[in-house]
Amino acid sequence: MQRIFSAGEYAWALFLGHLAIEKLLKACCARQLGSNVPKIHDLTRLAKRAGLSLTAEQEDCLDRLTMLQVNVRYHEERVVLRGRAGKMVAKRYMKEIAEIREWLVGVLSE
């Protein structure tokens, strides 16, 4: 994700960030639900299915990341994440992804 971000491919970097968070949430679901891991990509729904308590900020972040991953699949939305403004937006998301990732790794380590 970091290398792709550094190459200026902000939309794809964020898409990979979403995938990383999704996989961590699915690991939480597997621990909570066994083999009944939902085949969905909605991060907030996955967190709730895993029995995780979310702060309002975490839920907002997961909702935004979910919408972002849907949108970057289409050319028009990827264009928005190009250039200087796109880099600034992507940088903010990258920070949030890192924070959520760190939290989830901690949850899984318990």
Image (tube, rainbow, N blue to C red):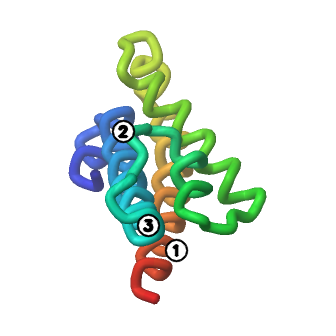
Q: Nearer the viewer, residue 85 or 45?
A: 45
**Badge number at residue 28:** 3
Which mark is drawn over residue 86? none
Tell me which numbered mark, 3 or 1, is placed earlier along the sequence.
Answer: 3
User: How far across and down, in percent of the image, does residue 43 sit?
Assistant: 52, 47
Question: What residue is disc 1 on?
Answer: 103
In front here: 36 or 62?
A: 36
Q: Position of residue 8 (x, y in %)?
A: 30, 37
Q: Identify the residue position indicated by label 2 in the image.
A: 15
- Dot 1 falls on a residue whose secondary structure is helix
Q: What residue type is labelled 2?
A: Phe
Q: How far across and down, in percent of the image, does residue 17 sit?
A: 37, 50
Rounded to the nearest angstrom, the CA distance separating label 1 from label 2 is 19 Å
Would you say 6 lies left or right of 57 here?
A: left
The one of 47 and 17 positioned closer to us in this rendering: 47
Q: Seen from this angle, which residue lies furthest right?
A: 56
Q: Name the front one of labels 3 and 2.
A: 3
The amino acid sitting under disc 3 is Cys
Q: Give the class, few, some or many, for how many residues have Cα within 10 Å of label 2's Cα (few <14, many ≥20).
A: some
Q: Secondary structure beneath disc 3?
A: helix
Q: How many labels does the image show?
A: 3
**Marks 3 and 1, how far apart at CA:** 12 Å
Residues at discs 1 and 2 in contact (Cβ within 8 Å): no
56 on left or right of 74 = right
